[in-house]
Image (spheres, rainbow, N blue to C red):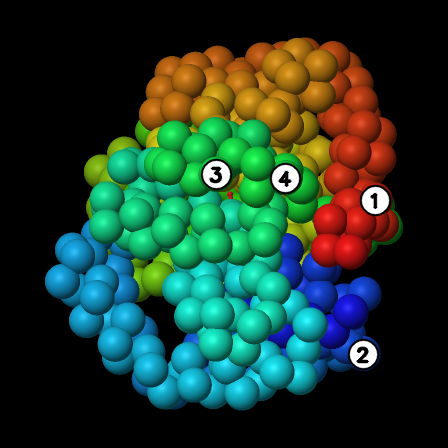
Amino acid sequence: MKILFLDQSGKPGGAELCLIDIAKPYQNNCLVGLFNGGSFKDLLEKNQIPVQVLTNKAIQVKKESSLTQGIASITQLAPLITKVVKIARNYDLIYANTQKALVVGAIASFFSRRLLVFHLHDILSPEHFSQTNRRIAVYCANRASLVIANSQASKKAFIEAGGKADKVEIVYNGFDPQTYINKESEIKQIRQQLELDDKFIVGHFSRLAPWKGQHILIEALAKCPPDVAVILVGDALFGEQDYVKQLHQQIDALQLQNRVKFLGFRHDIPLLMAACNLVAHTSTSPEPFGRVIVEAMLSGTPVVAAASGGAVELVEPGINGFLTTPGNPQELTEVINSCIQDKQKTAAIAQTARNSASQRFHVVNINQQIAQLLT
Ligand code: UDP
Ligand code: GLC
């Protein structure tokens, strides 16, 4: 099976990191076509996955675009589509990993007569996407032979937006548990490097964006004991500079400058997670899947997540983690405090999470599920 993967992003968001694991087994028989250059391309090359940037022109569709803008941007895509049609003739299948990739992939699959698969990483709800964008996505996805949804929540929203139920299969993201095993000495060292070795570290691992809710954690921190510190790991990947400014203002106003560290985008997530006493996920809108939640479990660090979207499929409160009401800093403060107070119970929960996540999300099992669906 020869696969042409398509992804619009040059930056490594969760959907792109997931694609690395999916494309790896096909590395001798695939090409990843990107609509933007950037560090995602470098990561694919590092993983020996063939990659080509297919256009240098920015694609203008925004999450909130109108119908006229939507149609106008599709006509702008003509040169890219022509290129994809030509390349696709050398492959058996087009695998679209993002929504703009889906639009290009759907048209190219029609002209090249190649099968189309769509990996749905988003919740197609009004909270996340305009009506026009939902309509375009659903129209194109209904022409695919298969839609792989990253959670029940994403599947449900897809069907509610008009997607055909019989096309959808749920496949969670896969992870290699080995990657999340760290040496005690390295964990100690990084805590020292962060100058937080005597603190209770709460880690937030996500791009800086309003709906990822870093501000909720900051608000919760203000009510926590002084030996609690926060690390914010991630960057504003899609130009959310105003939000970054807002976070700094909030931290200044609450006088938390000495207790919050911005680490920017990092490639040593497993070690940083292991260095934390708790990982907090605080999305204020439903999270389609939430890779960081599973990664925290695999790192052996307790995790608290916002109870919405895919997160509730991953976390069983009190068994393998904790849940809070999205947007509720008080509940988050309570969870942080109870983790500080009841270390033994918290450690047992983290251990249960590590054991179950290692099986449930093992990349080998997940890749088998995908291989079966593609045959
Ligand atoms: N991540 C990373 N470096 C960072 C921050 C995040 O590699 O500095 C990774 C993180 O480990 C996770 C992904 O980015 O695998 C984010 O995926 P998630 O599904 O949590 O959210 P998304 O950003 O895709 O909505
Ligand atoms: C998207 C979603 C995220 C999910 C990731 C991988 O980026 O926002 O929730 O974990 O895709 O499927």
Secondary structure, mark 3, is: loop
**Labels 4 and 2 touching (C-beta < 8 A):** no
Quarter placement of the N terminus: bottom right
User: Gap in Å between the C-alphas at discs 1 and 2?
Assistant: 20 Å
Question: Residue 357's x, y, as percent?
Answer: 77, 33
Q: Residue at x 67, y 45 (%)?
A: 173
Would you say the residues marked 4 and 1 are in contact, meaning their CB atoms lie under 8 Å apart? no
Task: In this rendered view, identify the residue nearer to me: 72 or 234.
Answer: 72
Q: Earlier in the sequence, mark 4 or mark 3?
A: 3
For the residue with label 3, is its CB less than 8 Å from the closest atom of ligand 2? no
Q: Which residue is mark 4?
A: 169
Is 247 rendered above or below residue 48?
A: above
Q: Which mark is residue 365?
A: 1
Crowd class of label 1 (few under 14; some 14 to 19; many from 20; radius 10 Å)? some
- Residue at (48% x, 70% y) in the render: 110
Alpha carbon separation for disc pair 2 and 3: 33 Å
Q: Position of residue 373 (x, y in %)?
A: 73, 49
Label at residue 326? none
